[in-house]
Amino acid sequence: MSLILVDSYSETYDGICFYWNSDGCGTAHSFVGKAGNIVNCKFYLKKIGNPTGNMIAKLYAHSGTFGVSSIPTGVVLATSDAIDISILPTSFNLIIFNFTGVEQYTLVADTYYCIAIEPVAGASLDDSNIVYVGSDIVNLLHSGNASDINVVPPYLPYPNAEVIFYVYAEETRYPFVTLSVEKRIKSLTVQKLQTGLGIEKRLTDLDIQKK
């Protein structure tokens, strides 16, 4: 198995569009899934002042028209481990949110999702203690769109904004199937009949393995 980048929007295009100054906030972006178990995501964040409490990432089911009115449905598919808001840097950096154990939800290829970050209830944010979420309102190069909670739910779509994000998953593949000796003998016999190739020696070797 290998770690794959499912979808992203680069910090090359960073700016400021979204910020949290109350404990009812959240910011999300829609993306297209690839087959794999979600492992982590990254958002481009910084703090001003001394906000405190925890924040988490959530994988949501998708609602709306992708890239126009995408928003999280409210159905949470996976929740990351919590991060202490107080450790956020004072200049923008990519912050990793890990999905562990049963929270490593299996993404379906070519399916729409929303990835979000939200403060946990009890976080302390106000007009002097703020979390900024790196975003872009100029280039708009992603096929999805941003959404945001403005003080209280639900999420509202922002079709002219992109959130800087990365989603990674552990790639899933079909399991490797090992044929029994009997089936391998049968397969080689069919090959011999169809092609006339001299494979008697391979058949003899498999007969020995079988015994």
Image (spheres, rainbow, N blue to C red):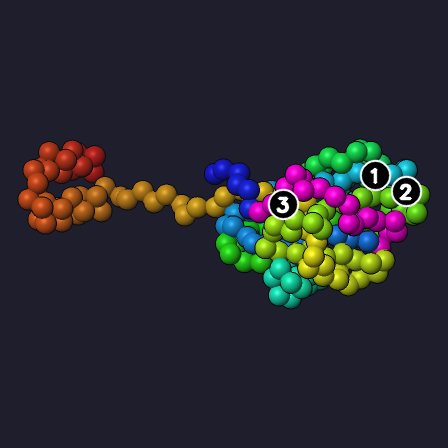
Q: Residue at x 79, y 33 (%)?
A: 91
Q: Residue at x 85, y 58 (%)?
A: 151
Q: CA distance from mark 3 to mark 2?
A: 26 Å
The magenta-colored residue range is 7-24
Q: How many marks?
A: 3
| Residue 40 lies in quadrant | top right
Quadrant into which the C terminus falls: top left
CB under 8 Å between callouts 1 and 2?
yes
Q: Is residue 75 visible?
A: no
| Side of 7 relative to 85 (left or right) | left
Q: Residue at x 44, y 46 (%)?
A: 173
- Label 2: few (<14), some or many (≥20) within 10 Å? some
- Label 1: few (<14), some or many (≥20) within 10 Å? many
Q: CA distance from mark 1 to mark 2?
A: 7 Å
Q: CA distance from mark 1 to mark 3?
A: 20 Å
Residue position marked by numbered label 3 in the rendering: 9
Amino acid identity at mark 3: Tyr
Residue at the extreme bottom of the image, as rendered: 64
Residue position marked by numbered label 1 in the rendering: 47
Question: Considering depth in this image, is 44 or 138 the residue closer to the camera?
Answer: 138
| Side of 133 relative to 34 (left or right) | right
Q: Which mark is residue 129?
A: 2
Amino acid identity at mark 1: Lys
